[in-house]
Image: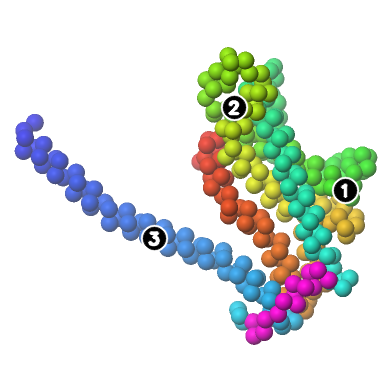
């Protein structure tokens, strides 16, 4: 190949790169514009709900986006509903206890099960994993009746235990963490065994620190599931003092929904704020955890 040909080739390559840069910039701007539209569409209802929670009008029908009068009375009725609804902060406390305890216990139980399936091979481990995956296909509504009968026989209905225990064993969490642990380099655990580490020490000091993104992902998913659960607390609780926040929102909707939507909106903001903040704070862990397990498309 001649020197002229080499020179022409090296000159053409930067030109092609420069020619593709405007196209890449236009594509990036278009993607940003589309994402902005979707973000605004998602944010406006939340903003309208927040503004409406300070609306002094008794009915929002026909009212504009910005209310003519602002008041904090809607929020005070959450604490003193005058017998028309459940005290929302009692329900908020119940939801917090259930979600936090369920999340912590699920992280311990699911990580141990995943470690056993991934790093402690035993006869029938593949069958156990297959059964877990197949059980994920069973809708939760199918097991509500036997679950209710089981907790009734144990005397756990209308207790925190009845609300927490169903969220402790997450089949999806077991599969998620098992895949995460299986992708870890074998040399790490083998080196620990050579140094005299047993299975518990290997799990505690080697595996757990390396699967923190997966644990964060599972923790967020379990927290959101326990916080937003409505059907099982509706069945398992029988007194207002044990109701969770989704159940309390129904009482506010029934008590104030016909005339005072501001109270309903205030209770809605209180309900969605904690999981929204948790998700926004830790969404990068969800992306990192799912991508590192090979579950992405």
Look at 69% across and 73% down and name the residue there: 53
Give left or right: position of 41 versus 251. Answer: left
Point out the stretch of residues depicted in magenta: 67-80
- Alpha carbons under labels 1 and 2: distance apart: 37 Å
Q: How many marks?
A: 3
Look at 89% across and 71% down and name the residue there: 83
First along the sequence among labels 1 and 2: 1
Label at residue 179: none
Measured as percent of width and height from the top left, residue 100 is found at 73, 47
Query: Against 260, is 297 above or below?
Result: above
- Alpha carbons under labels 2 and 3: distance apart: 44 Å
- Alpha carbons under labels 1 and 3: distance apart: 52 Å
| Residue beneath disc 1 | 159
| Residue beneath disc 3 | 30
The quadrant of the rendering that contains the N terminus is: top left
Q: Is residue 171 visible?
A: no
First along the sequence among labels 1 and 3: 3
Looking at the image, do the residues carrying marks 2 and 3 touch, with CB atoms under 8 Å apart? no
Measured as percent of width and height from the top left, residue 63 is found at 65, 82
* SS assignment at label 2: helix
Query: Against 242, is 49 above or below?
Result: below
* SS assignment at label 3: helix
Look at 84% across and 44% down and name the residue there: 161
Q: Nearer the viewer, mark 1 or mark 3?
A: 1
| Residue beneath disc 2 | 206
Inspect the magenta stretch and tell me whether residue 75 lies in it: yes
Measured as percent of width and height from the top left, residue 102 is found at 75, 44
Looking at the image, do the residues carrying marks 1 and 3 touch, with CB atoms under 8 Å apart? no
Instruction: Judge the density around disc 3: few (<14), some (14-19), many (≥20) Cα neighbours within 10 Å.
Output: few
Give left or right: position of 140 versus 39. Answer: right
User: Dividing the picture into quarters, in which one does residue 94 lie?
Assistant: bottom right
Q: Is residue 26 visible?
A: yes
């Amino acid at each position: 190949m001649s020197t002229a040909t080499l020179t022409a080739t090296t000159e053409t390559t930067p030109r092609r790169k420069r020619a593709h840069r405007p196209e890449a910039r236009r594509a990036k701007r278009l993607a940003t514009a589309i994402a902005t539209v979707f973000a605004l569409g998602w944010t406006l209802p939340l903003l309208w709900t927040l503004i409406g929670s300070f609306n002094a009008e008794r009915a929002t029908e026909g009212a504009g986006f910005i209310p003519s009068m602002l008041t904090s009375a809607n929020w005070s009725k959450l604490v003193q509903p005058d017998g028309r609804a459940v005290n929302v902060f009692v329900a908020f406390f119940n939801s917090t206890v259930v979600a936090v305890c369920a999340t912590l216990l699920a992280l311990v139980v699911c990580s141990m099960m995943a470690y056993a399936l991934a790093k402690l091979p035993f006869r029938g481990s593949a069958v156990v994993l297959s059964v877990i995956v197949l059980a994920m296909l069973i809708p939760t509504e199918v097991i509500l009746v036997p679950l209710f009968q089981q907790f009734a026989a144990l005397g756990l209905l209308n207790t925190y235990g009845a609300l927490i225990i169903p969220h402790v064993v997450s089949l999806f969490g077991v599969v998620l963490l098992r895949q995460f642990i299986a992708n870890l380099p074998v040399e790490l655990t083998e080196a620990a065994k050579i140094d005299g580490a047993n299975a518990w020490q290997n799990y505690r000091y080697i595996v757990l620190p390396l699967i923190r993104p997966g644990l964060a992902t599972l923790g967020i998913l379990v927290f959101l599931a326990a916080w937003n659960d409505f059907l099982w607390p509706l069945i398992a609780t029988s007194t207002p003092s044990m109701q969770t926040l989704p159940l309390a929102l129904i009482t506010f909707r029934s008590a104030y929904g016909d005339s005072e939507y501001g109270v309903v909106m205030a209770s809605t903001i209180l309900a969605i704020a904690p999981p929204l903040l948790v998700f926004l704070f830790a969404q990068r862990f969800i992306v990192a955890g799912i991508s590192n397990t090979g579950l992405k498309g």
